[in-house]
Structure formats: structure tokens, C-alpha cells
Amino acid sequence: MSGGIFVTVEGIDGAGKSTHLAALRAWFEARGREVVMTREPGGTELAEALREMVLHRPMDTLTEALLVFAARRDHLVHLIEPALSRGAVVLGDRFTDASFAYQGGGRGFDGQVLAQLETWVQAGRQPQLTLWFDLPAAEAARRRAAVRAPDRFEAQDVAFFERVIAGYAARQAADPARFERIDARGEPGEVWRRVEAVLQRRFPA
């Protein structure tokens, strides 16, 4: 492995993707890599401020999409691109696939508008690998209820999250070389073994 590497984790709330970020970091660090961990919306001071608005204030879906992509632009310019330029591994908890899944799939927002925002904001930048933690919506809801109070997205019903899953499936179908679907059912150790098998295949020593 040489040069910067951009890896993202995706999945509905409660699928367990965030649980494995520390193990992902350790896996790359064990191979001598600098690792930068970040999240979306967020990652920079401005993007974190926008995150609070998106998660906790009522707004229409166009406003929501614009704020998410504004946060993403600042994130790319000030954190992601500089880290990749110096050869770091960037581990992102969500990226643009989440916009297509949540705003596009979950809320039914116009995918052509999202695609135009993606073009403007990212200038072609995509992750080299996206790990999609796929878990049935009802099971994810049970997991969420057991650990935390919901934010504006997590409070949505199971049908909403089923549409989000369909949004992720559509993104995977459109870019299968980038995506790896991870079966997120089972104990964390079992799921991690699936993730590690992908990493060993994608990034051989």
C-alpha cells in the first residue's frame, strides 16, 4: 500500500458501522500507515456546526441536502484532500452515498439534484473502498433503541430505513467495484472477520 487511501463506512443507523472504526484504524496502523478518522456531516469546525443543524433542526429536504453538501465541501478542502495528499489513510464514517441513501432513498429527494451537487462539490473524488454494513431495518431499530435517544434521522420509522437500504443498494449497483457489502448480522467479532477478509483482499501486503 502506498499513496493516500480513502475508505468510507456506510449503513443505516444501528447497523454497527461505527463499532468497527477503531479496528479499521488499528488494521492500517499495524501496516505502518498514518490514519485520519473523520465523519459526515462533520470533520471540520464549520462542518460540525452544520451537522448540529442537520441533525436537530426542522428543515425541508432541499435545505438538508444543501447543508450536507456544504459541510462535505469544507470537509474535503480542509481535511480529506490534505490528508490524502500527504499519503494518509482517511477513514470516513459516511460520505456521499449517505446523501443518496437518506435524502434520495429515505426522503425521496430528486437524485439528479444530488448527482449535480456531487459533481460540483467533489470534482471526481470518491473513496477507493466503501464498506456497506447491511442490516435489516427492524433489527437496526432494536439496536438503536437499546443504546441511545434518537436524533431527527434515527426517529424515523422502519419504512424510512427500508427506503434508505434500497438507496444504498442502488449506489452499490451503480459502482460495484468500489462497494463491499458487509453482512452486519451477528456478534461484532463475527462481523469484523468479514471486514478483515475484505481488507486483506483489497489491500494485500
Image (cartoon, helix red, strand yellow):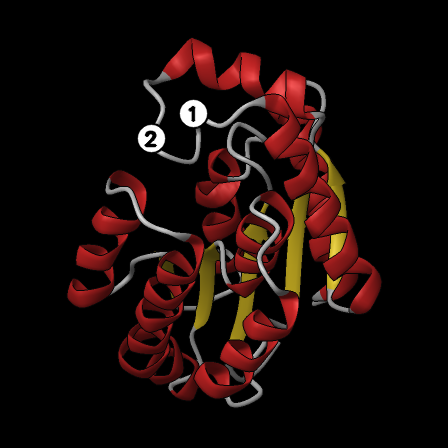
Quadrant of res 8: bottom right
Q: Which SS class for mark 2?
A: loop
Q: Amino acid at mark 2?
A: Asp
- Residue 91, label in figure: none
Q: Measuring 77% from the left and 50% from the top, which residue is drawn there?
A: 169
Q: Are marks 2 and 1 in contact (CB under 8 Å)?
A: yes
Q: Is residue 20 above or below residue 172?
A: above
Q: Is residue 80 above or below residue 64?
A: below
- Residue 155, label in figure: 1
Q: Position of residue 151 (x, y in %)?
A: 33, 30
Q: Measuring 35% from the left and 18% from the top, which residue is drawn there?
A: 148
Q: Position of residue 195 (x, y in %)?
A: 69, 44
Q: Which residue is mark 2?
A: 151
Quadrant of res 126: bottom right
Callout 2: 10 Å neighbours few (<14), some, many (20+)? few
Q: Is residue 13 above or below residue 176?
A: above
Q: Measuring 38% from the left and 52% from the top, which residue is drawn there?
A: 60
Quarter of the picture containing the C terminus is: bottom right
Q: Which SS class for mark 1?
A: loop
Q: Is residue 8 left or right of residue 81?
A: right
Q: Is residue 36 visible?
A: no
Quarter of the picture containing the N terminus is: bottom right
Q: Amino acid at mark 1?
A: Ala
Q: Is residue 98 above or below residue 13?
A: below
Q: Measuring 43% from the left and 81% from the top, which residue is drawn there?
A: 84
Callout 1: 10 Å neighbours few (<14), some, many (20+)? few
Q: Is residue 34 left or right of residue 101?
A: left
